[in-house]
Image: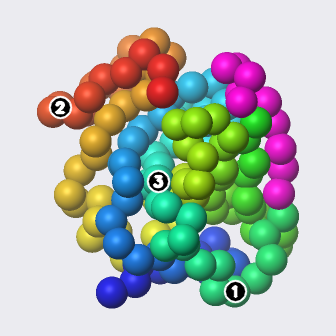
Amino acid sequence: MATTGECLCGACTYSYTGDPAIKALCHCQTCRKISGGTNTVNFAIPGPNFTLTKGKPKTFETEHETGMKITLFFCPECGTAMWKEADSDAFKGLKLVQVGTLSDTAQLEKGMDAELWIKYRVPWLAAVDGVEQKSQF
């Protein structure tokens, strides 16, 4: 059964099959700017399992503080960040889906696997119990 997601206005939609390779919160400086908040929450989906089903997202490329290139895919109408891709070995071939775009949030109830860049986690946000705490990726 496919999992689906969409932007705020519905102009861009996607689906994927299977389980995420990893489910992680990221507190890095780049993810803060992408989300407009203190972190992003990401499901890493293998590229072959991911399909853009509607729309044509715009892209924006930036350099992460580690030097890797990140490409952000976002709706050209409403601006919703839908997924990102990175050229580092750790993320090659993965679509880092922003979980706020999921149509059905039941997968979120299964919890996360890791928190990344915890040195940037704001002090008033507690660590997620029972998940790997990583200083970087």
Q: Which residue is mark 2?
A: 129
Please say whether residue 62 is visible from this viewpoint: yes
Mark 1: which amino acid?
Answer: Lys
Q: For the residue carrying disc 2, how many other residues have a C-alpha within 10 Å: few (<14), some (14-19), or many (20+)?
A: few
Q: Position of residue 99 (x, y in %)?
A: 46, 59
Please say whether residue 10 is visible from this viewpoint: no
Q: Which residue is mark 3?
A: 44
Real-space CA distance between mark 2 and mark 1, rounded to the nearest whole angstrom: 37 Å
Mark 3: which amino acid?
Answer: Ala
Real-space CA distance between mark 3 and mark 1, rounded to the nearest whole angstrom: 20 Å
Instruction: Identify the secondary structure beneath mark 3.
Output: strand
Q: Earlier in the sequence, mark 2 or mark 1?
A: 1
Q: For the residue carrying disc 1, how many other residues have a C-alpha within 10 Å: few (<14), some (14-19), or many (20+)?
A: few
Please check the rendered image and state whether residue 62 is part of the magenta-colored stretch, yes or no: yes
Q: Earlier in the sequence, mark 3 or mark 1?
A: 3
Left or right, residue 56 beside residue 53: right
Q: Which mark is residue 54?
A: 1
The picture quadrant where one finds residue 43 is: bottom left
